[in-house]
Amino acid sequence: MRINLLGANIDGLNMQDTVAKIASFINQGNRACQVITLNPEYLYRAQHEPELLQLVNRADLVTPDGAGIVWASRLLGTPVPERVTGIDLMLALMPVAARAGWRVFLLGAAPGVAAAAAANLQRQYPGLQVVGSRHGYFTPAEEAALLQQIKEARPHLLFVALGMPRQEQWIARHKDLLGVPVAIGVGGSLDVIAG
Ligand code: UDP
């Protein structure tokens, strides 16, 4: 089920079905899918920035990230089942990734944070393959090498924490070149996981 809220198409899936949908993207593996966890701040900005709305409506999966989104969906008579935030989704994917052998790449946050988050995740989910991590303060001149690093690591899942909406724009711009089956913008999640 897909609902429309202020021009944005949002998938009405609960967490379990969201994880299953992402698994199907990875198992098909034939194209680069973008997942956006849509929060009210983004939706608000998108009212004035058509490019941001376009990004949402071109994404392969859009989750309701925020109580305000869930509330508004009920008010409109097209309720989504529950809130699916970036951090919750990321953590829900980890045990599945560990079991299925999905390779994970973490991009973003201050120097040291992505690596610390990777170490914590690998401790918590034995067998999890984190095939790379890189901080999010790269210059335009460093970007080509970064893209190459991600490509060579061949992750199934790329988590991008550059802040919203930059991470969504960055994923949209580079996903086809990277050929990563699933890329998700996760905001401040790496900071949280790094502790
Ligand atoms: N960040 C980054 N590069 C930048 C700007 C921000 O890696 O050029 C990181 C920042 O360190 C933080 C994350 O992006 O880890 C943004 O977190 P925030 O909670 O502000 O995310 P939002 O909720 O705005 O998406």
Image (spheres, helix red, strand yellow):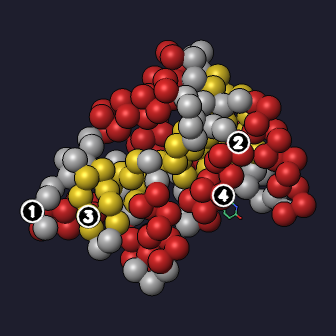
Residue 77 marker: 1
Identify the residue at image location x=42%, y=54%: 37
Identify residue type, mark 2: Leu
> Dot 1: what SS?
loop
> Dot 4: what SS?
helix
> Dot 2: what SS?
helix
Q: How packed is label 3: few (under 14 Cα within 10 Å), some, or many (20 or more)?
A: few
Q: CA distance from mark 1 to mark 2?
A: 39 Å
Residue 178 marker: 2
The quadrant of the rendering that contains the C terminus is: top right
Whether residue 72 is visible, yes or no, is: yes
Whether residue 167 is visible, yes or no, is: no
Q: Earlier in the sequence, mark 3 or mark 1?
A: 3
Identify residue type, mark 3: Asn
Q: How packed is label 4: few (under 14 Cα within 10 Å), some, or many (20 or more)?
A: few
Query: Which mark lies nearer to you, 3 or 1?
Result: 3
Question: Disc 3 marks which residue?
Answer: 4
> Dot 3: what SS?
strand
Q: Is residue 176 above or below residue 96?
A: below
Q: Measuring from the top left, give residue 88's x and y in whole percent.
A: 41, 43
Q: How many marks?
A: 4
Q: Is mark 1 within 8 Å of ligand 1?
A: no
Q: Measuring from the top left, give residue 59's x and y in whole percent.
A: 46, 53
Residue 173 marker: 4
Q: CA distance from mark 1 to mark 4?
A: 35 Å
Q: How packed is label 1: few (under 14 Cα within 10 Å), some, or many (20 or more)?
A: few
Q: In the shown orientation, is residue 11 left or right of residue 179?
A: left
